[in-house]
Image (cartoon, helix red, strand yellow):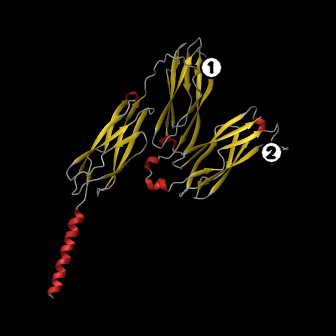
Amino acid sequence: MLQHKVITIITALFLVSGQVYAQKSAEINITEHTYDFGSIAEADGLATHSFTIQNTGTDPLVITRITASCGCTRPEYSKAPIEPGQTAEIKISYNPKGRPGPFHKSVSVFSNAKNGKQTLYVKGSVKPKPTQTAKAVVSYPYGIGGLKLQTKTIQYSSIRPGETLGEKIGIKNEGEHPVTVKAGKTPNYLTAEIRPSTLEPGETGEITLLFNTDLSRKMGRITTVLPLTVESGGKKKGTEGTIEVAANVIDNFSKWSATDKANAPVIQFSATSLDFGKLPEKGGSIIPFIGGGGKESENLIITNTGKTPLSVYSVTCDNDHVDISGGKKELKPGASAEYKVSVRPKDIKTKLEAFINVVCNDPNSPVRLIKVTAEK
């Protein structure tokens, strides 16, 4: 009987001590979750704010990792344990370079705290750099009516969801009369601002294009055009022209864990270039629209040699002389897909040199280029 009572008391003591031990834990407390930078200038460089965190638990608090929603936002923190009751700072810097317009970015904080992941936010609006008058000679080789442009093609760098990128085109009135430049309708993800909209003879200006991925809601290569109308000398009917715009929208791989990247898909191609050689004077079929419709074709095979499914967001070519068909949108590990790449000899008058853009979820190669060449 006595032995039974002793065992009961020891068991109770273990349970109580276990409950006391279980109650010990770190707890992260953040009173400020969002900071508004307000209006910041692109020319001023990094905008930085420090968030204060406090350990309101009973055990040391350890920040294990911090991830940002895009590469434009950089967190800095100490990995040293934060003792109970003590505070520390998480410094977040936003890089406004090349990102005019509003922004709203998130930073996820992971720790050993019992209240789990915490999210911090920075927001604001970036004022673009003022136009600087360069002493060097600026070339305006392209024209729409009386307006001259530095380029008629905008190629954005890779953009991630949640980002807005801006590009500028210099313009100049090299005519003898004032010109008024008007932008036509564009997709909602692309906005255009022309400053000034009316240029006197010899006056320069710029066209600013903002690409917003939150509004595009599409992954892969996106192409569109900006219609322009140039009115000169008070004439009611202007000259029509366009600016070609292209961007590759890729995944935000900064959110991927080390495990995600270790098990990532891997894209592999059967060839890094397709050379059609010297094209025949006529198409690949003697009778039009039969057996290929006068086209010459090559096959491009894409294989997933990784450990998880490969998402092929787009396989496209900006050159209208290159057609692409077939393929799949998703490839399981070890699977392959065949794409048919075709050109029509009768449409090609000179040497062809183009690129196929492949956009996928391979973190090491989200955008790949396949060169296409042909001789006439």
**Callout 2, which amino acid?**
Phe
Q: Secondary structure at mark 2?
A: loop
**Callout 1, which amino acid?**
Gly
Taking 197 as reference, is 236 left or right? Answer: right
Residue 226, horizontal then vertical, whole percent: 57, 31
The one of 70 and 368 positioned closer to us in this rendering:
368
At label 1, counting other C-alpha atoms closer than 10 Å, the crowd grade (few under 14, some 14-19, many 20 or more) is some
Quadrant the N terminus occupies: bottom left
Residue 27, horizontal then vertical, whole percent: 25, 55
At label 2, counting other C-alpha atoms closer than 10 Å, the crowd grade (few under 14, some 14-19, many 20 or more) is few
Tell me which residue sits at (64%, 39%) in the image. 355
Rendered view: 192 above or below 270: above
Label tally: 2
The one of 327 and 137 positioned closer to us in this rendering:
137
Taking 155 as reference, is 346 left or right? Answer: right
Residue that mark 1 sits on: 145
Residue at far top of view: 176
Quadrant the C terminus occupies: top right
Tell me which residue sits at (47%, 48%) in the image. 253
For residue 289, the mark is: 2
Rendered view: 87 above or below 41: below
Taking 321 as reference, is 138 left or right? Answer: left
Q: Quadrant of residue 373?
A: top right
Rendered view: 258 above or below 249: below
Residue at far right of view: 286
Residue 93, horizontal then vertical, whole percent: 36, 38
Distance between mark 2 and mark 1 Cα atoms: 40 Å
Say whether disc 2 or disc 1 marks the residue closer to the N-terminus: 1
Q: Secondary structure at mark 1?
A: loop
